[in-house]
Every structure is written in structure tokens, then in C-alpha cells.
Amino acid sequence: MRCLFLPLLLASPALAGERFPLGALGATGEVTTGEAAVVVTAVQPDGPAARAGLAAGDRLVGLGAEAFPTHGKGVDAGGDGPQRVLGLALDQACALEDDARRRIVLRVVREDQPGLLTVALPHRPALGAEDPGPARRELARAAERQLREGQRLVGKWEAPVGLTGDRWITAWALVALLESGVDPADEQVLSAARWLSGPDEHAWVNDDPLTKGPDNLGNWAIAATCVALAEHDLARGTQEWRPTLERCAAALAARCSEEGRYGHDVVTGYGGKGLNVINCLAHLAWERCEAAGAAIDRAAWDRSLESLRASLDPNGGVRYWTMKGTGTGDATLRTASLALALGRAEEAADLNGSLLDYLERHPARAREAHAMGTPGLMLTPHALATRSPEAREAFLEEWRWYLALMRGPDDRLHYIGGKGNNGGDSYLGFGQVAAVTALLLVAEPGPR
């Protein structure tokens, strides 16, 4: 079918919705709560959408004869609406072998004039196939290439905010590469591990971890450093990073208050109420350290876990603070990191069962971590894998639309945020966050 429209518009109107990439179409769009349309905000030059005649400002209102459903805003809506429908349709259409049939028909409105636009698509295997392995491996290779391109010569990935941000994104990039099966002796992997270990292998943690200062690493980065270096040692069967791991694990223990609570760094946050996400990440860090042969402070583990038990909501999610009534709409990162730690450690089966129940019941909430739209997605499939392969597969099916929309026609992975505050992801660099998220979503959970 031919394009029925006027010449391309140069700009899209200002909108206040949720922006996201349009996958293999090679464009970006925006959805607004309660509306059944995607407003095209940009079109990649010489991409499939541009070649077909799609333009910024066009409104996509459906596929073929079917209109889009309305976009839902609530955390349990996930991608319900145009995002899910478009992502799943692209995943299916791109897998067709016949070039003549590998098309998608868009229902488009331009300047109030409706029409149909047929877009020829690149070939790629389907994530929704009976055997999704080839599609996941291809996606992982694209994400790995993207990560490798962004690594600095010193071994790190650079975050816009520096300091803790550099260490957080570098640690999770290293974990993602290892989980995707990259050789732990690969020079880029080694350089990342060496950089994370820091000067004198102290990982930028002061001798006195309670001393506040610009060179004393924050708890987010300390926990991530533990996970990354422990995974590297486990993958190689060595204990090279054991001194660094024990220094970092001890720092997390020292910063755990008598009530078992944490702040972003040295001081317990929010007037002593604490910050449960740090507790949960500390448990994941301690579990990985112990698995790699490093000693941890069990008294701090118990103190923190008791605080988290008091923070468990009746629905099984970990609340923001210990105090009741703080809600669990953004609980996935907290819940998944704690469940992953307890599942691997084979501890606190009662608590862990509640956490996993929450993750299975609320898969659509996974990208609603407070101030970030990605770490919950990164960790939840690995936490659910400790319960069963089926639980992990059900979660990945929930997010198949997301993976399909992330990957552009040029194989670049593009960021998709949550429905609320995504400022934390912006601190880390959207392109590299997208690659890390994709890798950890599709990586087969390892035996380590």
C-alpha cells in the first residue's frame, strides 16, 4: 500500500506523555494516559519508517483494521495500550521469512486525515517464538556490542553525574556481560573489574567507612561493586578480589544502624526512617560476597533482615520505609534484590516466599522502581528463576513488547523508562542503561 499523506512535517507538538522508541520502525513516539494513539515525535533518517513516509507529528491510531486500545497510566497497566500492541506486532512481523510479507500496516492520522501506511521491516527472529533462544541471543549480542563501544580506556563506563554513578553503571555493565556469557578473561571485562577495585584495591572506600567525604563511596555503588567483583571471581574460579570484597562488605555492615537501617551513604536517611532499597541491595551484595569466599558480618545481616521483615507489606512487597502505609507500587527493585539474595542463600524461606509471590503477582510493576525504570527489570527474572523456570518465562513474556520496542532497525538498544520518575536512569546514561537492562533481562541465569 502506498502512503496517502501530505509532505513530511518538520516538528511534533509539545506533549506531556510517556516517550518511547518504536522498535524496528526507526522512530520515537509518545503516549498519553487515556488516549488510544501514539504521536510520532521523531523519525530516524533513512530508517524503515522514514522510507515509508512516516513523519514527526503523525498519530498512529492502530494496526491494519484494528484500533489501538487506550494507554493505561497505573503501575499495574505496564505497557497496556498502544505500546504492547505495537511491540508484539513488530516482534511477530519481523520474524517473517518472506520479504514481501515482512510488513506492518499502520493506521495513521495526519492533519486530521486518516490513512494507511505500509512499512517494510528488517528480519530478526521472534522473541515470542516457541524457542525464543535465537532471538534472545541476537538481542544480547547487539546489547553487548553497544556496551563495549561505550567503555572508556580506563575500564569504566562514564555516568553524567560521575562518582557513585560511574561505579554503579560500571558494576552492572560488568555483571551484565558476565551473565550473558562473555569470557571473564576478556580484556574489557578485566579492565572493568580492575577499575572497580580502585586504587590499592580499596574500591574508593575509606579506612573508616563512617567518614563522610567525596572520596568515600556511597552505598548504592558499594553494593553494586560487591556484586560485580564477586561475580567476576565466581566466573573465573578465583578469589582475587576477596580483600576488596571484604572491605566493601564491612563498610556496608558498619553503616547499618542499630535499628538495621540505611541511608544513601554514611547517615541513616530520612530522619532515621532509613532507605530499604539499600538494605535489600546490601543483602544481595553480602550473599554474592559470601558465595565468592569473602567473609561477611552476620550480625549486620540479621539486623538488616529484621528491619526488612518489619517493612514487609501484607501483599509481600518491601515498602519504601519500615513505617507502614508507604505503599508498594515501586517495590520491585527492593523486593527482587532481597528475593534474589535469599533465594541464592537458601535462607528465610518464609520471607522469600512472600517476596516471590509479590513478584509473580505484579510483573507489570517491574519498571516502577523509585527514581529509576530499570533495576527492577534487571533483577526480577533472576529472582524468579530461583523459584522456577516457568516463573521466569512468564515474566519475560510480560515484557516481550518492551524488548521488541527497545531494539531499533540499526540494532541499537534504546531506553524505555517507567511511568513516573526516571531521574536515576538519566544519571547513568540512557543508552548504556538500555543495553545493561536488555542483557540482564534475556541472560540465562547462571549456576554461580
Image (tube, rainbow, N blue to C red):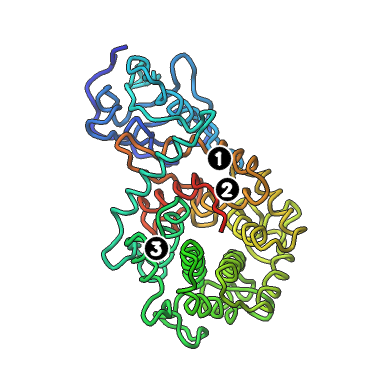
Circle 3 residues within 10 Å: few <14, some 14–19, many ≥20? many
Q: On screen, 206 above or below 45?
A: below
The x and y percentages for residue 220 are: 50, 68
Residue 69 x, y percent position in the rendering: 53, 26
The amino acid type found where label 1 is placed reads: Leu
Q: CA distance from mark 3 to mark 2?
A: 21 Å
- Give the residue at mark 1: 396
Image quarter in which the N terminus is found: top left
For this rendering, which residue is in front, 177 or 37?
Answer: 177
Q: Residue at 51% of width from left, 80% of height from top? A: 247
Image quadrant in which the C terminus is located:
bottom right
In percent of width and height, residue 13 lies at 33, 35
Q: Residues within 10 Å of mark 2 (few under 14, many from 20)?
A: many
* Front-lying residue, 179 or 321: 179
* Res. 20 visible in picture: no
Query: Residue 170's mark?
Result: 3
Query: What is the spatial separation of the Cα atoms under label 1 and label 2, in whole angstroms?
Result: 7 Å
Alpha carbons under labels 1 and 3: distance apart? 25 Å
Say what secondary structure mark 3 lies in: helix
SS type, badge 2? helix
The image quadrant of residue 110 is: top left
Q: Which badge, 1 or 2, is on the more N-terminal residue?
A: 2
Q: Residue at x 39, y 49 (%)?
A: 435
Proximity of marks 1 and 2: CB atoms separated by less than 8 Å: yes
- If you read the primary sequence from the N terminus, does the residue marked by circle 1 or circle 3 appear first? 3
Disc nearer the start of the sequence (3/2): 3
State the residue position of label 2. Answer: 381
Q: State the residue lying farthest toward the top.
A: 1
Whole-percent x, y for residue 283 in the image: 61, 67
Give me the residue at 27% from left, 35% from top: 44
Q: Specify the amino acid type for callout 2.
A: Pro
